[in-house]
Each structure stands twice: as structure tokens, then as C-alpha cells.
Image (cartoon, rainbow, N blue to C red):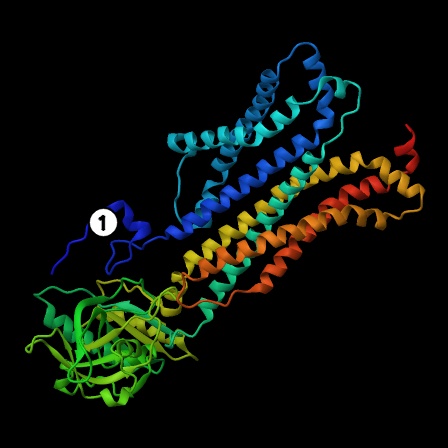
Amino acid sequence: NLEFNLQAVENIHLYSDYTYEPETHGSATTVVFLNIISILIILIAWVNYINLSTAKAIDRAREVGVRKAIGAHKSQLVTQFLFESFMLNMMAAIFAVLIAQLLYPNFNQLVGKDVIGSIWLNELFLAKVFAFAFVGAIVSGIYPALVLSNFRTVTVLKGKFRNSTKGTFLRKSLVVVQFTVSLMLIASTFIVNQQVSYMQSADKGIDINYVVEFKKPRFTRENEKEMTEKVKQFTQSLLNHHAIKNVGTSNSIPGGSLSDISSTTGEIQIVGKTNVIEGTTYIQYCDDKYFDAVGIRLLAGRNFDATMATDTAAIIVNETYLQRLGVHDYEAMLDEYIQYGEAEDDRKYRLIGIMKDYNRTSLKNKVEPTASLYWDDSSNMVARLDITNYQDGIAYLEETYESYFPNTPLSYTFLDERFNTLFQEDQQFGRVIATFSILAIIVASLGLFGLSAFMAFNRAKEVGIRKVLGASISQILMIFYREFVVLIGLSAVVGIPLVYYTMDNWLNNYAYRVDFPWVFVGVAILLVIASALLTIGYQTIRVAIKNPSETLKYE
């Protein structure tokens, strides 16, 4: 049966990963993560507004009382406070767009893509920003508006109004939300960096150090023979140089994208030894020098031999290939025939070697069942350089290429650089999360700074009395700290499961991943505690160092 599957072109970039894709694909998971992080940061800002608005309720209680006394209705007061929230959000949106216009080149550099051009000319973007600001005005302003408009006129005008237990509980709950979000973002930053570092340093199963890849010059039918002979002479010249150890060719070079290789789908079997199975096999065409050039190791059997004509019908497969067929005794399969298809006359290849599994692309993906077939005319070439004088090898490569192919520029890349490029997206993701984490801590600290300043001001007389009774500044600090340490403890209880759930799922996107690094969760908690204590400590000390006579002179 042949089945034709349709796919929307606009879905290719984020959701598709087939062989020979038309572009390097993106990651839908990354986009979702960044959306969530941006919403979390705005959530912290909204929490700040709600916290400070309700905390300042005492200062606005008399205003509300007077307005009600002269005939203002509750709906008018709600409208007033919502309008204030609306104006603040709109002003913030305007400033945000101005700052974004200044910083968008830096942002494009941070994420490695030209995300947006001129912000003021992008009507859809502006519409979304101001729509979000409008939603923010409602979300952050509705509760303070209802609280402030519900004050009883007689109570507040008599000066008997105090912050309610419910209001205090809400503020503490919102502070827990802030600490939880900050904890999640900081821990996520560390975990992403840990995974990227692991992938860069992990053993890929091949030796890619001091190996360069480059392409042969293209040729036409008219000059095919001439170019083929030139390539042979060029290759031999390279091998004669003391700084070049091996030169090989292949259709697929390690460090490419997932789709940068040929593949075939259908029935395969080892004739007379295994059952027929269906599945995709990745096909690599290479010459007899390629394995040595990139450090591919053989576990059994031998490499291709250019002097043996029968090797054009030979095949070398990796461990995963045989394991999929249910074979674990590699030696016993040597010189058996692998057949593609079930028909008697389908092509058969003699198995001459089994290569050790190696990662040809990012460690996000498992090693694929791969078969190597002999072909000495692939377009890609690789050269292994001598470690001690590899620069001489590069210089000779450039000079020799220029002499043989003067009309074709040489473009080469070290294989370790190709692999590093594969991890670039994850590195950029880590940098974006780190940047957002710093923003989140700054926004949370600003809110905490204002809230702790208000609390310290309201408790100034309490601090004065404690000092009169002999309390030291450190003891007063501990009283203020105790309340917030409890809140941080609650945020840890909420945040740790959330961090584990989200980041462990993120790590599961990688075939090769680190164990969940609990130590970084502990470090994140310590950083949250440190930022909170510094912020609160500054405001508390400002009140605590005052002379008690200043804070108690009105009593």
C-alpha cells in the first residue's frame, strides 16, 4: 500500500523533522516554554500591583470614605480604580514598546533569529501588546478596585480601619506566587545549562577532533573524467603531507541535521537468520578511508577494501541496526546477507563489518539503525589532521585545493564546530531563560522592596518600642525575616514539584540527558532567599537604625 500524507507548509518549521527537510527546523517545545516564561514574568508584575494596591489601602481608605460621604456610588469607585489601573498599564505598554524598539536588535541576537523588524510598523504586534495591557489592567486592577470600593464610610472616617486578615493572607499568598515563579526560573536556567554542557562534552562514539570537512568541486558530464582524475591526484597529494593523516569521502558528514542523510523504508532481514521486519534504515555511502578519517570504530569484521570488487555489494551496519533485528551475537552474522524486500530477486548485501554506535547529530536523538555502503565518489570529503601541527595541514589543504581547483573557492569546517552549531539552539534557549530569570528576580524584588518598605513604615512604632525594651537591630531583623522565610518555605513546597515536573519533561525530549540535578534546585532556593533577605533587610534596617524618640514622639 502506498499512502500519501499531506502537511501544511506553515507547520514544517516547528513540527516537522523528515529526511531532507527544506530548512533547519525549529522547536515548538521551545516556543511554548518561552511563552510560559514571559507570562510568568508579567504575572509577577501583576502580583506586585495587587500587593501594593491592597497594602496601601489604609492610605486610600479616608479618600474612599469622603467620596462615599458626598454621594459616590460603589460602581463609580470601581470605575475610578480600574481606570487608574488601565492608565498605568497603558503607560507601561508605551514605555515597553519604546524600550523594545531600542533593544530588539539585541533580542534578535540573543535568540539567534530576526524575530521582528520595526516594531512601530508591525500593526499586529502593537495590537497584541495593547490588548495584553488591557487584559492586565482588568486582571491586576479588579481585586484592588473591589477592595477599596467596599470600605464602610463610618468606619474609615472614624479612623478605625485596619488591614483585614483576608487582605494580609492574600498578600502573603501572592508573595508565595512570586517566590515560586522566581525559584522555577532560576532552577530551569541551571538545568538547561547543565544539559547543554553534558551534550557538548559527552562521548559521541567517534573522534571528531582536528577533522575538517569540505566539498569536492562540482563538475559537468563533459568534464567528469577530467575532474575525477583531478580529485584522485588531489587526494593523494593530501595524503602525502606529514600533517594530514587520512582523507575520506561520504554523502553524510557527522554534525549535520537529523535529515542530512539518505534513508529507505521497507522490509529488511538477514537471510535465513532473522525474521523480516519493517522500518526506516539510514543509508551512508562512503569510501574505504572514511571510517579512519572520522574515527568510527569496528566491533567486528573489517572495513571496505577498494581493491576488492565484491565490496561494491558489501554492507557495514551499526549496533542499533542489528539490535532492531534481534541480533546480539555480532560475529555470527559476518558474511551473512542482508536483504531489502521479501522478493527472491531483491538486492542482497554481504555483511562484512559491524561499527560501534555513534551520534552523527545532536544528542537529542537516539542513534539510528544505519548501514554503510561502498561508494568512492561522494561529494563530501573529510581530512584528519595531525594534532601537533594541524595548522600546517590546513595551510597545505588550502594551497593544494587552490592549485587543483583554482576556479572553486574552498569552504571547510571543523567537525567539532559543526557539532557545537547543533547545540546553538539549546545554548540560546539557556541564555534566554537566564535573561528572563534575571528580569523575574528584578521585578519580584521591586515589588518586595515596595511591600517591605510599606510594612516597615507601618511597624515603625513597634520597632521603636522593641528598641526601647532592649531589642538589637539583629533581633528586629530576625522578626521581619521569620515571616518571609516561612513564605519562601511555602514557595519551595509548591515550586519544587513544579520544577521537577516541567524540567524533567523537558529533559525527556533528549535521548541522552542528565539525571535530574536536585542540587540546582537547592541553589535556586538559596538565591531566592538571598535576594529576598537583602531586599527586606535594607528596608528594615532603615527603620531599625532610627532613634526610638523619632518613631514614638506622637504617642
Give the percent coordinates (x, y) of residue 314: 17, 82
- What amino acid type is highlighted by mark number 1? Gln
Mark 1 neighbour class, 10 Å CA radius: few under 14, some 14 to 19, many 20 or more: few
Residue occupying image coordinates x 63% and y 60%: 523
Residue 238 in view (yes/no) = no
Does residue 330 sit above or below 499 in this rendering? below
Name the quadrant of the C terminus: top right
Left or right, 506 with reference to 232: right
Q: What is the quadrant of residue 409 in the picture?
A: bottom left
Foreground: 436 or 424? 436
Residue occupying image coordinates x 68% and y 34%: 167
Give the percent coordinates (x, y) of residue 206: 36, 77
Left or right, 538 with reference to 181: right
For label 1, the residue is 7
Does residue 547 sit above or below 261 in this rendering? above
Residue occupying image coordinates x 50% and y 53%: 431
Q: Secondary structure at mark 1?
A: loop
Residue 284 in view (yes/no) = yes
Residue occupying image coordinates x 11% and y 74%: 342
Q: What is the quadrant of residue 392 in the picture?
A: bottom left
Give the percent coordinates (x, y) of residue 228: 15, 73
Question: Which residue lies most toward the bottom here?
Answer: 332
